[in-house]
Amino acid sequence: MNRHNYYTALEIAELAERLKVGQLPMTKSGVIRFIEREGWDKSALCRDRIGRGGGKEYHFSLFPEFLINAMIAADQQAQMQADAAKAMAEEQKALATLGGTDLSARQRAVMEARAGIVQAVKAHEIEFQCTMGQAVLAIVERAKNDRVFAKLAQAANDKSGNGKSRTLSRAVVYRWIKDHKEQGVTALAPKASRDTHSFPQWFGVFMGYYARPQAPTITAALDDLRYKARLKDLPSYDQVRRCLSKLDRLEGTQARHRGREGVQALKARHAYVVRDTSGLMPTSVYTADGKIFDAEVQHPIHGRPFRPEITAVLDVYTRKCVGWSVGLAENAKDVRDALRVACMENGIPAVFYVDRGPGFKNDALDNQLTGFCARLGITKMHSLPYNSQARGIVERFNGSALNPLAKQFDSYIGVDMDREARQKAFKTSRKELKEIGGSALLPTWQEFMEALAEWIIDYNRSAHDGLTYRDRSGRKHKITPEDLWQKAQDSGFEPVTVMPHEADDLFRPMIRRRTRRGLVEFMTNSYFDLALEPYDGLDVLVGYDVHDATRVWVREIDQAGDEELPGRLIAVAAFEGNKERYIPLSYEQAATERRAAARLRRLDAHRDEIEAEANPHRFVTQSASPSISIVTTPPPVTIDAVKEADILSASPRPSVTATPSPPTVSSTGNRPPLGDDHLFAAWCSANAEKMTEKDRAYLQSLLRSKYARDLLSVHGHDLNALRKLIDRAA
């Protein structure tokens, strides 16, 4: 019983009035006289009132039996009402979440109306402490006189005709109560008036022609049905359209497009869940993705145009870009570098949420012993295939930050770039590359990197629509990622950081190797240290620097249960020598040489293919009749012979013969002497306004020559500045 143990005379009077107990007075003075008459004031269960006001209070065990019974009955009724209210709320919730695929709109409306009648009967039974029969009779009578219940009864009856003549009957209400009790609320739904799941026999054949990736129209599919299936009774266009609409109602619009669209396109038609990040903190979850830049830049090695791959790491809670890296393509090295920057500058994440691309799913990150995530204690999670919406934060960053940056360059090639302007920029840049070895339309690698760094700083300092906070008045305001990060730190958040002395060892790549007589081998290099001698024949971990092959860091492998972990540092082994090279081969050098060798092989194969197309007779081994070869001209000079002749006749410094002759140097123009290309380029840089057309042509010819470009670079000339100088002169 939900009540206290001691009551004052006033509280007893109010209790008697509320419970309608006529045997007790319902005033304070009357209750006091009743207490004196019954002798409660002399009992040990009478005590002075605690608190303000003084007086006496009496334990409920002194109450007469009729008052205690009334109190128990009141408590039971209150509990029944609470249970009924809870059951009704749960049923309303079940009705709200009940799927509508199996019920039509009419069936659902009737079911809800009948459930309302059943709930009204239960509520009346509890409120008035009557039997179910009395409650049913009261509700039936109420449906005749109450307009609201009359409409509810009309909907529950599911009958056509005049609503006034359609009232409730006791037998029908009893049947609804019985069905609801035995089978649940869905048993109150009426049966379908007809089999709505049946389709004509021709519809399955039609869908075979309609549900194709080519996405034919209804008319085209009907034509295929007419000429290929050869059905006797062909449906009309309206019949097909009605069947497709029926399919939409029963199975959803996805069923119509199944077969016409792939997995990704169909997924865009499904419902999605918005993920709430309000319960997170900074560094709780990092997410990352790679994106090919939508503008061309100059390659950092050979200067030709290419589109770099940008890997960005974002904090999910604050949307802050905490780390980024740029490479030639998405790979483990760039991902690891971006994550390294994020951990060093902002903190180690608890979860790293990424897709299943090769840059994120590889041994360098996942290996339990040497993997990057294992050593930092990061839990890596992968999104499902074709589920980029789950990583909407980083996808939105690619669209809202990186795409606008690409549009700042003249070499932008996005889908929204004007087609004519894109073609013009492409032709101009290729022409300039061919003529002078570079193009002013293409940003240099350094210009691109500086612009990207500044753009990401601006992004972190810009207010986002998805980041808001409320002020004291309750109004919402947008906030920047950096400000939200700072607010978390002001509230006591501290990131898990990497100490400077730990950074080199934590972020250094590791590989498992076996020692041999104090030696450990890696990338065809041999490394030696006397401390490795006791570990002969054992596996160790070798940490290496991708840029420096002069030494490696060798660690033990510790066993923690079934898990292997990096152990103590054994030695820093120095390069001892190898059989193939006089100097050590670094990991980066080896990768670069492998890539160059692969490109040369592809070029050789392409050359063989071109020669085969140009000289098909060289590969013909048999013919229908014997051929007679008549030599009328001297044999042609081969390419190798030409090269050999050029080499034998070449001077120590090759001359530029296929270019315009150098301009005449006048004594009044203060030009350098003839043949001094370095001084000539310096004079052009300092006297751009004095350059003539011949000066421009000769400078252009110098930039076409690789030898001349190398010479100018050695003397410190900026080739891009010279190219722009030619463009301005033109």
Image (tube, rainbow, N blue to C red):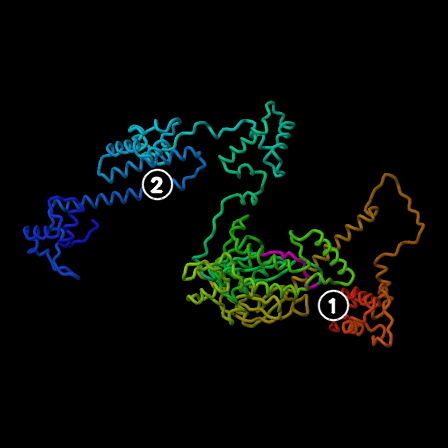
> Cα distance, mark 2 to mark 1?
78 Å
Residue 511 appears anywhere in the view:
no
In magenta stretch: residue 30? no
Task: Indicate the secondary structure of the residue bearing disc 2.
Answer: helix
Q: Which residues are magenta?
A: 290-301
Q: What amino acid type should be assigned to the residue bearing mark 2?
A: Glu
Residue 571, numbered circle: none
Residue, x 6% and y 50% (percent of image)?
38
Residue 80 appears anywhere in the view:
yes
User: Which is nearer the N-term, disc 2 or disc 1?
Assistant: 2
- Residue at which label 1 appears: 719
Q: Is residue 220 left or right of residue 440?
A: left
Q: Residue furthest right?
A: 632
Q: Is residue 649 left or right of residue 425?
A: right
- Residue at which label 2 appears: 91
Residue, x 68% and y 70% (percent of image)?
582
Residue 339 rendering spot, x and y as whole percentages: 54, 62
| Residue 40 against residue 627 in the figure, above or below | below
| Residue 650 against residue 151 in the figure, above or below | below
Residue closest to the eye, 21 or 676: 21
Residue closest to the eye, 64 or 601: 64
